[in-house]
Image: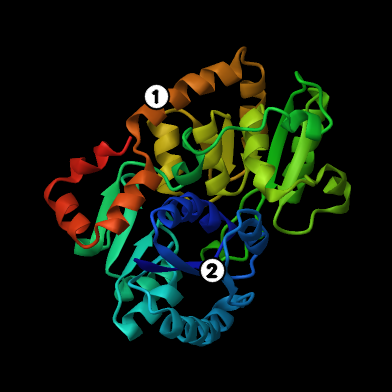
Amino acid sequence: MKIMIDIGHPAHVHYFRNFIKIMNEKGHEFFITARNKEVTHELLNYYRIPFKSRGKGRRGYLGKFLYIFEADYKLLKEAKKFNPDLFLSFGSAYAAQVSKIIGKPHIAFDDTEHAKYEHLMYVPFTDIILTPSCFWKKFGAKQIFFNGYMELCYLNKKYFQPDINIKKKLGLKFDGKYVVLRFVSWGASHDTGQSGLSDETKLNLVNFLKSYNYKIFISSEADLPENLEKYKLNIHPAEFHSILAYAQLYIGEGSTTSSECSILGTPNIYVNSLSVGNCKEQEEKYGLCFHLKNDNKVIDIVKELLIRKNLKDEWNNKREKMLSDKIDVTAFMVWFVENYPKSVKILKENPDYQFNFR
């Protein structure tokens, strides 16, 4: 089978890298296109996944609209040469539209309910949309739910074990405790009008954590204020999940990183006016996440968490309960694509068939 995948964000590299590895070993062929966004290309090179750049994209609604024609042209040109059997993506408008132009199916994954612009641009041109069971937006007959999270594609224990030497790489002793903060750039279309941590709260958090003698590491998509620059995390992006795994606490504006922490057994506070289904389920069903719509009470919750005894043990127990409920999303993905379109009929008739993939 010949599969064309479009990657638009660093997270998408993680979603598909184990799938690509397994499918390559089975003899399937891939052509990958990738936006030059943040560390996307760096991760693809690190995992030795060949790809073709489709450029950096554009900002703003007008810029994004004009970029559609540019990206579609680039993908169409490559698709005509590669002649894929199907397209696969995480909600890529460009893969969806080009698939329709050349008459090939497009399978999309999605876990971002509030990405209204992206849904408008890819859903009409997509054959099947696979979403987590906690995803609350409905796309009709083309939607199939699976009992898992996208982050399980790479953080399932079968595929990931944290680097036990990561504290040494961070300059910490084996028993050293640290907290990770992450700030987003607020540049995505669905971020318009939304908010998270104010600069004042960011500084107050750092000072509060320092008073508890925690080491602080900050990951930020945007430039940091000068007084926080010294806390910036300087590591290879492939090491980030090991850092999250051994952190005492994570506080941030990104839902993906909060979900990653829940899966890794790290207490986390997601501060963002936007709600997402995975963090909502992880908070309400499993008690693994705290979601705050604004930053008014964030320091109160941090204080309450840090005074708990055996905090990480408590979270690991909750994590094990959550993992026992979920499927192996990568194994499910491999089966679904290899058996498409028969796999659609099987899941429509028997949704529990997915639980064969544990």
Q: Quadrant of residue 38?
A: bottom right
Given the image, on which type of amino acid does mark 1 rest? Lys
The disc, 2 or 1, on the residue closer to the chain's N-terminal end is 2
Q: How far across and how far down the image is residue 217, in percent?
A: 76, 39
Residue 180 point in image, percent of width and height: 70, 37
At 37% from the left edge and 40% from the top edge, which residue is drawn?
A: 328
Q: Residue 242 appears in which quarter of the rendering? A: top right
Judging from the image, the colouring scheme is rainbow
Residue under the image location 43 percent in, 80 percent down:
79
Viewer-proximal residue among 275 and 26? 26
Name the residue carrying label 1: 321
The tag on residue 135 is none
Image location of residue 288, percent across then percent down: 49, 30
- In the rendered image, the quadrant that contains the C terminus is top left
Task: Locate residue 251, reporting x and y percent.
Answer: 64, 38
Is the N terminus in the top left, top right, bottom left or bottom right quadrant?
Answer: bottom left
Seen in the picture, residue 248 relative to 259 is either above or below; the reply is above
Residue type at mark 2 is Ser
* Mark 2–mark 1 distance (CA, rounded to whole Å): 35 Å
Q: Is residue 137 visible?
A: no
Give the residue pinned by disc 2. Answer: 189
Q: Answer yes or no: do the residues labelled 2 and 1 have beta carbons within 8 Å?
A: no
- Secondary structure of the residue carrying tag 2 is helix
Q: Secondary structure at mark 1?
A: helix
Classify mark 1: residues with Cα within 10 Å, few (<14), some (14-19) or many (20+).
few
Q: Is residue 275 above or below residue 109?
A: above
Q: Depth check: 186 or 97 in front? A: 97
